[in-house]
Image (cartoon, helix red, strand yellow):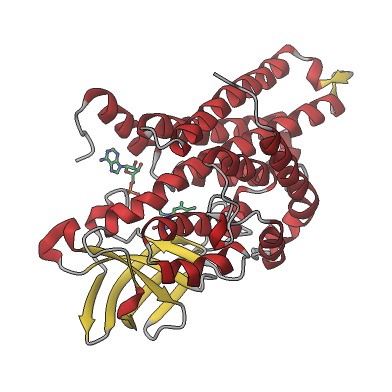
Amino acid sequence: MNFELTEEQVMLRSLARKFAEQEMFPKLKEYERQRKVNYDLIKKMGELGLIGTNIPQEYGGGGLDYTSAAIIWEQLSWASWTQTLTSLGHNIVTGTILTKVASQEQRRNYLPPMCKGELIMAIGVVEPNAGSDAAAVETTARLDGDQWVINGTKNFISAGGIADIVLTLVQTDRSQGTRGMALIAIDKGAPGFSSAAVEMVGNRAGDIANLAFTDCRVPKENLIGEIGRGLQNGLIGIDVARLFVAAGAIGMAQSCLDACIKYTKERHQFGKPIASFQLVQEAIARMAAETEAVRLLVYYAGELKTKELPHAKELSSAKWLATELAVRVSAEAIRLHGAYGCTDDFGVEHHYRDAALGTILGGTTEMHKLIIGRELLGINAMV
Ligand SMILES: Cc1cc2nc3c(=O)[nH]c(=O)nc-3n(C[C@H](O)[C@H](O)[C@H](O)COP(=O)(O)OP(=O)(O)OC[C@H]3O[C@@H](n4cnc5c(N)ncnc54)[C@H](O)[C@@H]3O)c2cc1C
């Protein structure tokens, strides 16, 4: 058992943290207030190799193990979970799917520009009637000559409004159930494709969109992987998303803790720094202890995933505990800052808004509890 990060991981951690502190945090407020995506960040992240972290080097990625890639995500989320999700989240998810199931030609076409931040690709699974139950997807794809004709809608798609291509889960034959499902790459310029931005509690410097496909046509060759394996192939990406969402939640919790340590030593009430009150120290001690404990669980899930060992229980535990921890810690951080914490001047309020989102995407807390239950008891209580 080795709890030490490798030299490379220490170096990556400090590179990503420096980027978060110097490039992300100083301009975050401006972009959040204007509700704008910072495209410069995406470009710079691409140049520094912070986007395709776990994509193989032969396709322009970093070829990193999952724990190392999660450490980068954690550090970037220290500044902004939303900007991290918007800049590289969708690429990591779709990039992983493409690496595992796309043809050689598709990998060569999509992955190198994606790793440079020049091509943005989103993943479209969720629909009005298919949320936690992804097998209920109703968007249809029908072959007409050498084109797919797609009809349906996708909801809450990260980077859905800015993506050049959306990897979309479709149903090619409803009578086949999940065996009729497939992933199809749909270009944003395809006829019949439109998107509409979604306003959320957090994600202010990000992009979430609902997508509509009306007799949308794309070439037959845009099928990614096999018909009949669309759901399984989509889940390959969702499994990675769970790890990175968990790592991002740890980054948010650490950021809130750091802000509280600084602020409670500076803020005086009753003639002393508020850090000298025992209740304040208890809150900070709890934040620190829980963040450290769950961080180890997240890294452990990453290690199991890298080694291709069974990891469903550990990853679901990490995703559940890390995201719920970020909700609690960010709320506590707001309280410790008093009314100042409710403004966007102290670097905790945006985490409070973003943390809520982390408990939902990549599977809700309830879904992860049910996965753990299924792993331990051998009974699927989800259906
Ligand atoms: C910030 C953000 C980004 C997202 N990005 C993407 C994206 O890029 N691509 C994409 O496809 N989707 C994306 N989503 C959608 C996300 O995957 C879904 O919101 C999520 O899967 C839950 O589905 P739902 O919102 O329809 O909730 P529902 O499935 O309707 O769940 C509502 C509630 O019911 C509970 N519930 C449901 N079924 C059960 C059950 N069997 N047992 C117990 N409780 C149950 C849930 O836990 C939840 O509390 C994103 C969502 C957010 C918030």
Image point (28%, 28%), residue name: 375
Task: Describe residue 238's horizontal placement relative to residue 1 as left or right.
Answer: left
Q: Is residue 58 above or below residue 118?
A: above
Q: Quadrant of residue 150?
A: bottom left
Residue 325 seen in the current view: yes
Residue 132, given in percent of the width and then of the height, sits at 31, 48
Residue 368, given in percent of the width and then of the height, sits at 36, 35
Task: Describe residue 111's horizontal placement relative to residue 258 as left or right.
Answer: left
Q: Is residue 197 above or below residue 54?
A: below
Task: Describe residue 231's horizontal placement relative to residue 264 as left or right.
Answer: left
Q: Quadrant of residue 69?
A: top right
Task: Describe residue 162's horizontal placement relative to residue 171 as left or right.
Answer: right
Residue 255 seen in the current view: no
The C terminus is located in which quarter?
Answer: top left
Looking at the rendered structure, the number of numbered marks drawn on it comes to: 0
Q: Nearer the viewer, residue 259 or 4?
A: 4
Q: Nearer the viewer, residue 166 or 279?
A: 166
Q: Is residue 277 above or below residue 154?
A: above
Q: Residue furthest right?
A: 271
Q: Residue furthest top?
A: 278
Residue 381, given in percent of the width and then of the height, sits at 21, 33
The N terminus is located in which quarter?
Answer: top right
Residue 110, given in percent of the width and then of the height, sits at 49, 69
Q: Nearer the viewer, residue 196 or 250?
A: 250
Image point (46%, 72%), residue name: 165
Image point (41%, 52%), residue name: 237
Q: Nearer the viewer, residue 352 or 156?
A: 156
Q: Is residue 241 above or below residue 334?
A: below
